[in-house]
Image (cartoon, grey):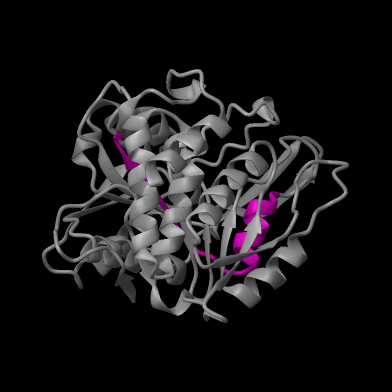
């Protein structure tokens, strides 16, 4: 069951709000929570440093357990086993994005981490941010993505030279639980429509199972409408009329594609917060999974997505006051427009943007 951790005073949804599974809540020791921190590759160190600076300034009751993990070859630090052990202890983590090589046999460490801990539900919040000009207004939808099967099952082999078989695994059990997550999220956050995204016109068994399962689960949630869209049509609709969407629930690959489309709609990957939930663990990370290797170390990255993901983490822990203050200060800086990073039309550095947030807070 999902528990609402947003203020109950109003049914109006604010930015970067969500519901959190009760089972994933960690223990508090000595007045503080211990949270696993995985900075990740590319700009990960810079944007997680921004979060740490803000939390330290605000005396947020969190101790970080830092684990270095990298998907880069010759980095000398895989670290997945250590990260898994840390998350098993702490139950909650903040994570940058890990690089996944395109060629060769290197596996995605992001996928490995989610599958090892069965962190099955990805939640990405796509919403216009005041002060960031976009082509379309009125965008406000949540994307719920199944994290552990589908095309990301990782089962590939070359049956004959030049012939590769890739297995897409779809199960009723995992389709049911991601559907329940999506409907529970909708119910707790006053959302009225859940749309199943699929390609059942071609993949009639696999995607047909997903589509049917979501619709069947929807019968248990009176007051919430359920419909479905073929993924290519959904992609077109997302750039033509995204205002029609409320909650999208998707298999793995389609969610990855639509989260990137959503990021482009509202101003880029530096603005989209996200979280991943399992029965026992929760990991918060930018919703649009871009590593940013090309701007690593330049102090130009936009830390907004990581900061807002961190405020989602705070709400998950019940630290709503800290979350509200930090998210409000972040949005105020963006809306004011004097200090903004290059990706949203400014010239400010990551550090300057962070300092502007601190000024708002203090």
Viewed as shown, does residue 319 lie left or right of 91?
left
Q: Is residue 200 visible?
A: no
Magenta part of the protein: which range? 108-129
Where on the picture, by quarter, is residue 121? bottom left
Choose between 74 and 218: the one closer to the eye. Answer: 74
What residue do we see at 57% from left, 37% from top? Answer: 290
What residue do we see at 65% from left, 67% from top? Answer: 116
Rendering coords of residue 281 (x, y %):
53, 71
Tell whether position 267 is magenta.
Answer: no
The N terminus - image quarter: bottom left
Choose between 254 and 211: the one closer to the eye. Answer: 254
State whether residue 133 is above or below residue 150. above
Choose between 121 and 310: the one closer to the eye. Answer: 310
Tell whether position 120 is magenta.
Answer: yes
Choose between 283 and 318: the one closer to the eye. Answer: 318
Rendering coords of residue 214 (x, y %):
31, 61
């Amino acid at each position: 069951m999902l528990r609402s951790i947003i203020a109950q005073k109003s049914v109006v949804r604010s930015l970067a709000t969500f519901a959190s599974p009760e089972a994933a809540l960690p223990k508090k020791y000595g007045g503080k929570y211990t949270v696993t921190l995985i900075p990740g590759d590319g700009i990960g160190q810079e944007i997680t440093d921004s979060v740490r600076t803000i939390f330290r300034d605000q005396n947020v009751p969190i101790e970080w357990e830092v684990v270095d993990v990298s998907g880069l070859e010759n980095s000398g630090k895989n670290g997945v086993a250590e990260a898994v052990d840390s998350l098993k202890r702490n139950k909650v983590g903040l994570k940058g994005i890990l690089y996944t090589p395109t060629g060769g046999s290197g596996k995605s460490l992001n996928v490995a981490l989610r599958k090892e801990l069965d962190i099955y539900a990805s939640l990405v919040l796509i919403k216009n941010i005041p002060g960031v000009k976009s082509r379309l207004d009125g965008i406000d939808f949540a994307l719920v993505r199944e994290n552990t099967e589908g095309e990301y099952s990782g089962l590939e082999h070359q049956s004959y030279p030049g012939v590769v078989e890739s297995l897409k695994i779809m199960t009723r059990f995992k389709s049911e639980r991601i559907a329940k997550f999506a409907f529970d999220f909708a119910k707790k956050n006053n959302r009225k429509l859940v749309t199943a995204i699929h390609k059942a016109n071609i993949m009639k068994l696999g995607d047909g199972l997903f589509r049917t399962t979501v619709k069947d689960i929807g019968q248990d949630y009176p007051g919430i409408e359920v419909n479905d869209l073929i993924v290519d049509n959904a992609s077109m609709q997302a750039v033509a009329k995204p205002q029609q969407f409320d909650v999208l629930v998707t298999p793995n690959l389609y969610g990855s594609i639509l989260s990137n489309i959503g990021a482009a709609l509202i101003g880029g990957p530096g603005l989209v917060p996200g979280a991943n939930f399992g029965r026992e663990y929760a990991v918060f990370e930018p919703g649009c999974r871009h590593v940013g290797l090309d701007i690593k170390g330049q102090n130009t990255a936009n830390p907004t997505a990581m900061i807002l993901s961190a405020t989602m983490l705070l709400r998950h822990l019940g630290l709503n006051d800290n979350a509200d203050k930090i998210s409000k200060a972040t949005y105020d800086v963006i809306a004011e427009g004097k200090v903004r990073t290059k990706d949203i039309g400014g010239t400010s550095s990551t550090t300057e943007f962070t300092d502007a947030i601190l000024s708002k807070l203090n």
